[in-house]
Structure formats: structure tokens, C-alpha cells
Amino acid sequence: MSDVCAGLSLTGERTLPGIWHENYWFQRHLAAYERVRAAGPRGVILEAGCGEGYGARLLADAGQTVVAMDYDAATVAHVRRRYPGLPVVRGNLVALPLGDRSVDWVVSLQTIEHLWDLDTFISECLRVLRRDGTLVVSTPNRHTFSPGLGFADKPANPFHHRELTALDLTDLITRHAASCEVLGLHHGEAITAWENHHGSIVQAQLAQPYDRWDADLVRVVTSLTAADFTLTHQELSSCLDLVAFVSAGDHDPANGNCRDG
């Protein structure tokens, strides 16, 4: 494991930077952060569920004011050591320790699938957003991450409480906000071309320990960047991950609901 990630374990719950055999997953996650950055967020950004902290650091390096938050004490301690100067706090994501309408963006990527009370989480995120604020949520697409899994079924990943489809995610969010824009993350041309010859790159990585990967798999995994993934409105049922952009709009913190719905 990279020295910069000392103290954090690869448990399957998170991916970490600087680990060569994790590069596919790291770049896949990084692609969503790059899309957030390209959206031009302004003001104060809360990252709810910051994990290792690389995403919050990326947004802060782009000139944004970012507050990182996580519930796990060891993770918060790591972020403080690894990214000095980046504000980080420990907080419960379903009871955010922030005032109403206190931030401009809430970014929560690859986190919601770990939570038990999804409605309260979405309501809390919208509560702390200013009226023109934006919430960004990403999560694995249940259709492709766990094929055949039903909404009420327990995911095979022990760290996931519930996995969502595009329809599930849209229904969840629109119970609290008037509308949302959902994008799907897909493999780009280079990965697709490799898969046309070798089959699923995910399955190839899972088929055996990384120290037994063949040279071609090692080459492609280590060469990937965030640009090797695309985000589009098309083919949401077959995408890898879902990314939702939500406008706070007329969400009313007093009752936890959108005034329009």
C-alpha cells in the first residue's frame, strides 16, 4: 500500500490513490469528481462522505472552498494528516452538523449505498444547501454492479446497505426535490476496445489476485486515467455508475420536503 494511505485499509469499501492495482477503480471514481469540477462549483462545498480525501483535495486545488466530512474517526484523522490545510470534520451524514442554507454545493460520491436512511440523508443535504445550491450524488448502478439483485435484496458487498438503479435514485431524490439530472458513467473507447478482445475488464481483475494478472491486464489497468470514462444521459440501465445533479430550489428545511412536491 502507498505510504500516503498508511492507516487506511483496502476493505472493499473505498478505493485509494497511489495503488497500482486499484487504478481502474480510482480513475472510475475520479471521473465523477472531474465532472463536478467541470460544472464550475462556486462558494462553499461540503463533501459528505469524503473517504480518503483525494476528491475534496481535487476540488480545493481547483480554487474552491471545500469542507470534507466523514463519520469514521480513522478516516478523518488520515485526511488531516494527508491533506494539511483542508478543513475536515467528523459528522453524521443523516444529521449534518451544519445550519440551514449554509453551503452552496454538497458533493457525496459513492457514499449513499452505505447508508441506512436514504431519505433523511437526501433531506439533510438539501437542508444545508442555499436556494441556488446543488447536490451531486453518485452510486454504483445496481443493474451492472450486482446483476439480478432486487431493490430489497441485501447486496453481496458487505459494506453496501442498498444499491440503486437510475429509477430508484430518481424516485428517491424527487421525493425531496422538484427534479434531478441523472447521468451514467460508461467505459470510454480505449477500455471498450480492450473488452472487445478480452471480455469484461472488471471480471478480469476479479478473476484472480492482482499479483497473478497477465502483463496485458497490468498494462491497461495502470495506463487508465479519468478521461477513459465518459458520462452521458444515454443508456442509464447499462451504465457503471450513476451521477445525479440536484437543484436545491424550493426545498423547505422546515419540513424536509420540496414545496413543489
Image (spheres, rainbow, N blue to C red):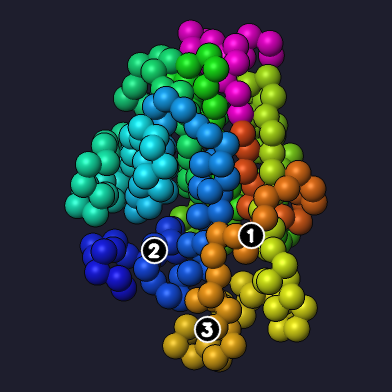
- Cα distance between the residues tagged 3 and 2: 16 Å
Q: Amino acid at mark 3?
A: Val
The boundaries of the magenta stretch are 246-261
Residue 7 shows which numbered tag? none
Q: Nearer the viewer, residue 10 or 223?
A: 223
Q: Amino acid at mark 2?
A: Pro
Q: Which residue is mark 3?
A: 218
Q: Amino acid at mark 1?
A: Phe
What residue appears at the point 50 percent right and 32 percent down from the top-left corner?
41
Tell me where residue 147 sits by quadrant: bottom right
Picture coordinates of residue 122, whole percent (x, y): 53, 29
Q: Nearer the viewer, residue 235 or 62?
A: 62
What residue appears at the point 25 percent right and 49 percent down from the top-left corner?
83
Dot 2 surroundings within 10 Å: few (below 14), some, or many (20 or more)? some
Q: Secondary structure at mark 2?
A: loop
Picture coordinates of residue 92, whole percent (x, y): 35, 34
Residue 229 shows which numbered tag? 1
Picture coordinates of residue 163, whole percent (x, y): 60, 49
